[in-house]
């Protein structure tokens, strides 16, 4: 191979690597735990209740949750860039559009593809598990697709927290549980609600970090509307409330003691709340680190919850 041919191959490889990194950035896989954990949680709770687990349906549920999450991330990037929320100097979104690494059309097409994949998986699950599941799936698709639509989307009408809680707190866990059991039951909510509160805490940490930037672009997000003091308090209530909401049914004997495994994560929760109570909207870099740590808290809380359920169930025989 000549030197010119070698150079051409190297350039192509670098171009392919650049594209891979761009799309990984656009998809934001670091956010996927908030959809993976509730899907696994629904399966674990179904197993704990004595139902036989179908591995194929579990994998499809997980894939569908990740696909719709990826589609929503891409669509949010599309709308936030068009509306001016994502721009030079801001920390929101993936940044691929701001840095010119992808086009609006490419991001929109990719979002549609992921929505199509999630819809195809959902169609199979509805066909297999019953039409009741269609209502849960439809709600998730609607929340994901309208979340960031300028002026009319949930985030523009102070309904972002509600939509995220409904989708990631209740919808995925309840849907995953239903896929395995064929039953709509209040029981999974004892697990889903605490995790959902941490997901909303993650969203709120994002809102606190972006409060000034969003305001400059014409959006008064919930954190900005609350003000610094109330915003800090709301974050603390969400984080500590997640533990209280889970420990209450444990102490009442409704949920098995294996759920107490989440207490391993409580020191991190204390640290996070302490940091946020001292933070101001102007300290964007400090708040940015709290976003990442809140995501870590949600992931470890959910993981320990699933592990606790499984270990306690195995020990109980």
Image (tube, rainbow, N blue to C red):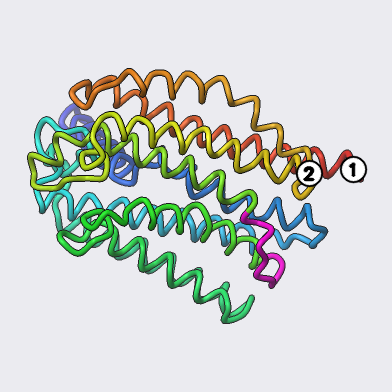
Query: How would you rate the neighbour count of disc 2 (Cα within 10 Å): few for under 14, some for 14-19, many for 20 or more?
Result: some
Span of residues in magenta = 180-189
The residue wearing badge 2 is 256
- Quadrant of the rendered image containing residue 100: top left
Report the residue at 43% width, 24% height from top: 273
Q: Provide the residue designation for mark 1.
A: 316
- Whether residue 1 is visible: no
Location of residue 115 with respect to 92 vertically, above or below: below
User: Residue 241, position in %: x, y?
Assistant: 53, 38
Local SS, label 2: loop
Q: Position of residue 109 (x, y in %)?
A: 24, 62
Residue 238 visible:
yes
Mark pair 2, 1: CA separation: 10 Å
Q: Are marks 2 and 1 in contact (CB under 8 Å)?
A: yes
- In the picture, which quadrant includes the N terminus? top left
Q: Nearer the viewer, residue 145 or 215?
A: 215
Q: Residue at x 48, y 40 (%)?
A: 198
């Amino acid at each position: 191979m000549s030197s010119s041919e070698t150079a051409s191959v190297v350039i192509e490889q670098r171009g392919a690597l650049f594209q891979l990194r761009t799309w990984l950035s656009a998809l934001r896989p670091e956010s996927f735990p908030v959809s993976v954990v509730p899907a696994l949680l629904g399966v674990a709770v179904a197993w704990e209740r004595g139902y036989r687990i179908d591995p194929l349906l579990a994998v499809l549920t997980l894939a569908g949750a990740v696909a719709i999450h990826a589609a929503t991330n891409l669509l949010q990037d599309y709308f936030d860039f068009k509306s001016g929320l994502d721009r030079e100097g801001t920390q929101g979104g993936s940044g691929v559009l701001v840095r010119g690494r992808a086009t609006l059309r490419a991001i929109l097409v990719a979002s549609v593809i992921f929505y199509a994949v999630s819809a195809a998986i959902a169609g199979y699950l509805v066909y297999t598990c019953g039409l009741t599941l269609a209502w849960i799936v439809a709600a998730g698709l609607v929340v994901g697709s309208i979340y960031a639509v300028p002026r009319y989307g949930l985030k523009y009408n102070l309904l972002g927290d509600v939509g995220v809680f409904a989708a990631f707190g209740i919808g995925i866990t309840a849907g995953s549980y239903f896929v395995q059991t064929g039953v709509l039951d209040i029981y999974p909510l004892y697990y889903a609600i605490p995790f959902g509160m941490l997901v909303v805490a993650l969203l709120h940490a994002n809102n606190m970090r972006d409060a000034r930037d969003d305001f400059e672009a014409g959006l008064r997000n919930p954190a900005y509307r609350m003000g610094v003091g109330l915003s800090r308090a709301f974050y603390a209530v969400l984080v500590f409330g997640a533990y209280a909401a889970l420990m209450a049914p444990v102490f009442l004997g409704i949920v098995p003691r294996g759920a107490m495994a989440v207490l391993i994560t409580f020191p991190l929760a204390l640290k996070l709340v302490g940091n946020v109570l001292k933070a101001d909207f102007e300290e964007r870099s400090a708040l940015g680190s709290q976003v990442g740590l809140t995501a870590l808290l949600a992931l470890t809380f959910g993981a320990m919850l699933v592990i606790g359920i499984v270990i306690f169930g195995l020990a109980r025989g």
